[in-house]
Image: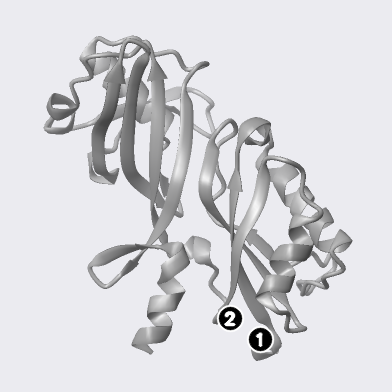
Amino acid sequence: MQNSFHRYLFGFYKKGNMRFISHLDLQRLFKRCIKRAGIVPAYSNGFNPHEKINIVHPLSLGFETEQDYFEMDTETPYETDFLVDRMNLALPEGIRFTFCREIPYSSRNSSSITESSLYEAFLPASQNLNIDGFIIQDRVVILKKDKKTKKMVEKEVKNWIGRIELIRESEEGSTVSMLLRSAPNETLNPVNLLEALCAFSGAAFDRESLRVTRKDLFARRGETLVPLSRYYEQEHQNG
C-alpha cells in the first residue's frame, strides 16, 4: 500500500572529477551506496522490480553542482542522520549528501514539481557580454540537437529565462548567473543559452573550457519560487 512507504529527500553536491559521471553511472553509484550502507529501499512492482529512487532533474555531463536532490522510498522508517552518515561512508571523493529529511509520500516525485535551476557559469576569454541587449530581443533563439533527427534546430526560449546577469568580468573571462526553466519536457540548457549570448555579443565561446555549476533547484509555492530543500518544509507549515 502507498501509505506504508516512507520517502526521503536528500541534498547532495557533485564536484571536481565527479562532474564527469553520467546520470546512469550516478544511479548505479547511489544503488551501491544504499546496499553497502545496509539500507533496504522499497521496490517497484512488476516483472523486473527496481529500487524506488529518483535523481531530481539530472544534470548534463560535465556540470558541477552545489545543491542537487535525490529521493529514496523505503518500507522501513529510518533516522535521517543515520541515512546521511551511513551513505556518505560509501561515496567517493567529490560527492557527498548534505542533508536528509522525510517528506510526504506521493505518487508524484519531486521532479514533477521542479520548475527552475539556478546556474553559475565561468566563460574563459569571454568579455563585453551584451546581456541587456540579448534579453530585450523580441525572440531569444538557441540551437539545440533534436533528439529524433539528431540535427541542430532552432528553439525560441525567451519565456524560459527567469534571470541572467553578469557577476564578474576580468581579463580571464566572465562569470554569469542564470535562473532557467528546468521542468519536465521544458528544460533550457545553460550551455546552449551562453553560446547564443556570446554569438549575439561577438564574444569568444570556448565550449570545452566552460565551467557550469548548478547552485540549486526551485519549485513554485504560490507566486514564489522556493528552493526544493524548503518546499516541503513550507508545505508542512501551510498544512
Q: Which residue is the site of mark 1?
A: 2
Instruction: Report crowding for label 2: few under 14, some 14 to 19, many 20 or more residues within 10 A (C-alpha).
Output: some
Of 230 and 135, the residue lying toward us: 230
Task: Give the percent coordinates (x, y) of residue 135.
Answer: 17, 32
Residue 124 visible, this orientation: yes
Query: In which quadrant is the N terminus drawn?
Result: bottom right
Name the residue: 47% across, 32% down: 212
Name the amino acid type tagged 2.
Tyr
Name the residue: 24% across, 43% down: 163
Does 162 sit above or below residue 175?
Answer: below
Of 62 and 86, the residue lying toward us: 86
Name the amino acid type tagged 1.
Gln
10 to the left or right of 35: left
- 2 or 1: mark nearer the eye: 2
Q: How is the image coloured?
A: one colour
Instruction: Report crowding for label 1: few under 14, some 14 to 19, many 20 or more residues within 10 A (C-alpha).
Output: few
Quick one: SS at disc 1?
helix
Name the image quarter holding residue 180.
Answer: top left
Name the residue: 23% across, 31% down: 140
Are the residues tagged 2 and 1 within 8 Å (C-beta)?
yes
Of 225 and 125, the residue lying toward us: 125
Name the residue: 18% across, 26% down: 134
Q: Residue 219 has which mark?
A: none
Query: In which quadrant is the C terminus drawn?
Result: bottom left
Residue 155 visible, this orientation: no
CA distance separating discs 2 and 1: 8 Å
Task: Give the percent coordinates (x, y) of residue 59.
Answer: 55, 42
Q: Which residue is the site of mark 2?
A: 105
Task: Give the percent coordinates (x, y) of residue 100.
Answer: 61, 68
Does 211 sit above or below residue 45?
Answer: above
163 to the left or right of 192: left
Name the image quarter holding residue 168.
Answer: top left
